[in-house]
Amino acid sequence: MNDSMVKVYITGTGAVKIARHYPLGVRDLAFQAGKQALAESGSDNVDFVIVASSLSYLQAPQLDLASYIASSLGLHGVRALSVEAGESSGLAALETAVSLIKSQEASRVLLIGVDKMTEHPSGPTYVMLQALYDTESDAYYNIGHAGIAALLMRLYMEKYEVDRLTLAYWPAMMHMHAKNNPHAMLPFAVAPEKVMTAMPIAEPITLLDAYPLGDGAAAIVLENGDELEGRPLAEIESVISATGMPSPALREDPLDLESLRTALGRLGGLEKIDVIELHDSFSIYGLLELETLGLAEKGESAKLVAEGYFSAEGEGPLVNPSGGLKARGHPIGATDVYKLVEVSRILAGTWQGVKRGDEETGMIVSINAAGSSSRIALLRKVKG
Amino acid sequence: MTQERPESRTGIHGWGAYVPRWRLPMEEIARVWGWPPHQYKGLNVKEKSVDSPDEDSTTMAIEAGYNALLRAKVDPSEIKAVFFGSESKPYAVKPSATIVAEALGITPVTMASDLEFACRAGSEGLRASIGLVSSGMMKYAMAIGSDTAQAEPGDVLEFTASSGAVAFIVGPREGAAAVFEATYTYVTDTPDFWRRALKPYPRHGEGFTGEPAYFHHIMSSVKNLLEETGYKPSDFKYAVFHQPNGKFPVRVGKRLGFTMEQIEPGLVTPFIGNTYNASALLGLARVLDRADPGDLILVAPFGSGAGSDTYILRVTEAVKEKQGLAPRFDDYLARRKTIDYALYTRYRKILTMLPRG
Amino acid sequence: MTRSLPVWWRRRIPRYRLIGARCKECGKIHYPPRTSCPYCGSNSLEEVQLPRRGILESYSVIYSVPGDNRLNAPIIVGLVNINGVRIVAELTDVLPGELSTGLEVEAVVRKISETSDTGIITYGVKFRPVLGAGSGAGQDTGEA
Ligand SMILES: [Zn+2]
């Protein structure tokens, strides 16, 4: 943790609706989100561009991506840095940006998360997505994008005797939330029974338990609180990470998200959180995260979700008002930046989607694969 | 036998069978191609084994070789030659023998090569192994016959061309489960069956594969060795012949003076079809699975092109303890699962017209 | 995606033979062998031959098939426990309806990928339900 007294604020946000953007490339998407965020922040003046991207390196290879994106934004001469950490790339980029600002190496940073998933058909794309998992062990085999999550889901169902229908309430809640998210890829309701009977993609996972393949870009402007140029939407209180076992097979309990547990320990416990954006590439991961964070007993999270505990009307914290990776979408390296945009808008009171209206603290969680690394960011409402 | 035969210094220390899981019934092939029942009824084959899409002659050889190692109980690194006999190599150029040897822990100090002689390459490997061991050049050698046999869809060959593998570890006569008393090989240039380079499917001379090829070579080979050794058919407990179908081995055996009682235990083609390089040698493996000490076995593989070997083996006391050390041929038979012709075309990659190893 | 030849080749032996690594510091075994122990970080490791039989703890039937694997669809993956060492691997010679957790499985060597008819074939360990070994000769060869 950085003990610098410098405060870091989000002063600009931008997000492109997640879709199959066949006409748009990585730079086009990054341009749209980046310009929106800069516009909201009130200035094009940044001294660092940090780009979070992951699958694009396999879909439409471009190395030193951040420099090319900076150039396409017209930010000639700016300092630029690309950050890749799989599905957790966005928060990894945030860690980098916050650290640059706190160390006063930078005072205004444009952070863009961008990814493409539709430059190739699904077959080759699943092979690329396998590389999020350990290519020297699990992903040596043809596990696809969903194989490991499916193994964990069956383990969970058998260990805690949770039936398939109970697990279907997660995607149902996500789709309900996404209906009001302006940049969600799948903004429509889905009944839990439909989840169960949807096309199986990796039994017991059906199509409706899994994130869709979509392209997207989201961006935020981060500023040093002492030299604010724009109006602050939210304060970044902390961002922390931990690495974990390369494969769940190596964990004493494969269902233990130990990297997230470690990251949580580094935060030194949780105060009351009002809104949480979890990483639910597959329903099972969202549920395991709830349990790891102590928001549900082991084996109990699915039931709580089914009872509406984490919905806008529920007693628990509001979980995934965006619709989650499941229904908002999950353009791999961009996803965390969408979460940052969404949570800061909720805290700033500018969010058009699902909310309770009195949110003061927000949490963003991301994991890569089944937990090769995990990251947590805490955001706070800016008072006054 | 006045003079010591070099092969008698050697014997089989381990044997291993492999048959893939899937079975395609004859009537299913006939249904697809409109053959009348008599076309296949006379073959005396019920169904044929079909390999899974993730199998090839190399993977099947690895499992057969592994089973042979379990029975031989020798350190794999003591094996100094691996001969891989096949006419369905996954690579036209690149030895399967090195893959098998590496997988089994035999590499790197070993000979390794792939042999081709239609259905008798595996048997040539067996004779070569006997030579290398009896000469003292090495203590153990492994001979493998393995095929995922190709047949053009609609060709009569399709009824029987099947998949299977067998492996033998040849070593000194001491400790062997069966000792080679005598061996013999008879070859001529007889083009009864062939596959030209870069062609996916073989061609054959139909009836020409019978008398001038199969029968002439096996009869010559067996008769000549019986004459040399002084044995007569009634001396043998078991007689195993190459099995392109279920009919030829019975016919050739009877012509040579053997009885059904001697032939039947080693007759595997009726249950799994013709596994080409594994054919007669799988019959030998099945016989060893049940043999008793003292039994005398005659085995005569055949390969088109054409040639036949004859082996005379005497089973020893060691056979009994080895029989249970690895899955038997019949254990593989028991896991059979029938498939239809559509699945067969997929498993065999006929559906996509990809070249098939 | 084409598999890199050296990447596959350098790890072939543990992949063929189910050779794991035992940590000389903490004693734990993992598979496939890594550069250092995933449990304690020591790079003092020794090869250990794993037993070929294990128990299926979880499995998935994959219909969203990665790459050019349509001929092998659906792909079945399993979480196999061999005396406490867990391995994620493909299952073979088994139909979706025959799967259940607790199933005893054994290692076999199979083709892992064969993405074109001109490229390299990669082989490695997969698991299948164990054979009914030792059932003796001369039975069950009839129609099912
Ligand atoms: Zn250790």
Image (cartoon, coloured by chain):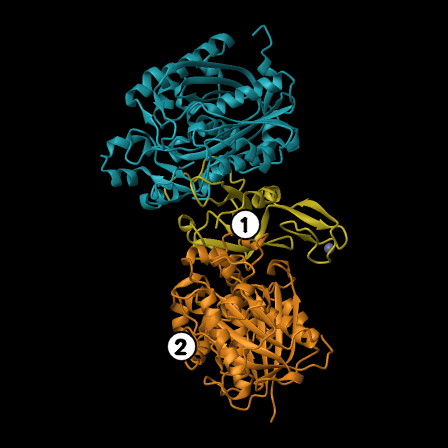
Chain colours: A orange, B cyan, C yellow
As displayed, is residue C122 above or below residue A373? above
**Residue found farthest to the top:** B2
Q: Which class describes the residues within 10 Å of circle 1: few (<14), some (14-19), or many (20+)?
A: many
**Residue found farthest to the right:** C25
SS at mark 2 in the image: loop
**Nearest the eye: A145 or A331:** A331
Q: Amino acid at mark 1?
A: Val
- Where is mark 1, residue-wise? C105
- Residue A277, numbered circle: none
Q: Chain of mark 1?
A: C
Q: Amino acid at mark 2?
A: Pro
SS at mark 1 in the image: strand
Q: Are marks 1 and 2 on the same chain?
A: no
Write down the quadrant of residue B349 in the picture. Answer: top left
Write down the quadrant of residue C98 in the picture. Answer: bottom left
**Nearest the eye: B127 or B215:** B127
Q: Chain of mark 2?
A: A
Q: Nearer the viewer, mark 1 or mark 2?
A: 2
Residue at (45%, 61%) from the top-left corner? A203
Percent of width and height locating residue A3: 74, 78
As displayed, is residue B19 above or below residue B5? below
- Under 8 Å from ligand 1: the CB of mark 2? no
Residue at (39%, 21%) from the top-left corner? B304
- Where is mark 2, residue-wise? A187
Residue at (50%, 29%) from the top-left corner? B285
